[in-house]
Image (spheres, grey):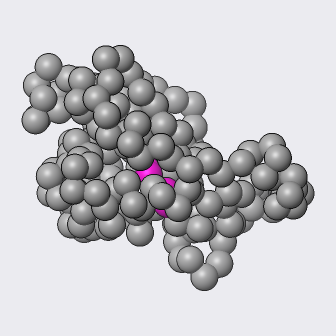
Amino acid sequence: MCRWLMEKRPKIPGTRELDRRLPILPIDVNAVLQPTDGVRVTWIGHATSLVQFDGINLLTDPVFSARAAPTQIMGPLRYRLVSPNLYHLLDLPEMKIHAVLISHNHYDHLDSNSVFELNRRFPEAWWFVPEGLDGWFKGCGCKNTKEMTWWEEQELPTHPNIKMAFTPAQHWCQRYIKDVNQF
């Protein structure tokens, strides 16, 4: 069994302490929808951010579920839920996601519920995914995928002047019991 599953996890502070240390702030939907002259990053939670520049909207490692697990019945709960008005923002007709960047396949960075919902809402979005995951995303219905390996660069097809680059990271991957470092 994986050593990290057996390790004692730190005690999560109670709601009052989390509200003080890590409050859930509402996303300023009007600000996010306004064009910006620079780069705007809206942190959504854990590794999920909305990055905006030059009229382009990118999402990183979208995880909107309550649990980072294969099922929402059991598994580790988020410390903090995402801002409730995130869903309002993503449902606005003027909101568009051009690309989604996935760093690796752990459940706290790659959530199937979020992938299905984003693909339903933004079918024209491009998915930049690590090598070995193209089939998984196609199985989720994502048609616009770009599978990448370390140091590879790919253009955003809708904006050829924008390139995504995958840089190496010292990290392991696992999604199921027997697929350690397979993708």
Camera-side residue of 104 and 90:
90
Residue at x-position 28% and y-position 29%: 35
Residue at x-position 33% and y-position 66%: 117
Camera-side residue of 153 and 180:
153
Give the answer, above or below, for where 86 lies relative to 29.
Answer: below
Q: What stretch of residues is rendered in magenta?
A: 60-64
Question: Is there any visible trace of residue 25 in the rendered image?
Answer: yes
Give the answer, above or below, for where 78 lies relative to 61.
Answer: below
Q: Main secondary structure of the magenta part?
A: loop
Q: Is residue 38 left or right of residue 121?
A: right
Q: Measuring from the top left, give residue 63's x and y in whole percent.
A: 49, 56
Q: Measuring from the top left, give residue 72's x and y in whole percent.
A: 56, 77
Task: Pick out the residue farthest to the front.
Answer: 30
Question: Is there any visible trace of residue 110 in the rendered image?
Answer: no
Q: Is residue 38 left or right of residue 106?
A: left
Q: Measuring from the top left, give residue 30's x and y in whole percent.
A: 38, 42
Task: Pick out the residue farthest to the bottom.
Answer: 73
Q: Is residue 147 left or right of residue 49?
A: left
Q: Image quadrant for the N terminus?
A: bottom right
Residue at x-position 44% and y-position 52%: 62
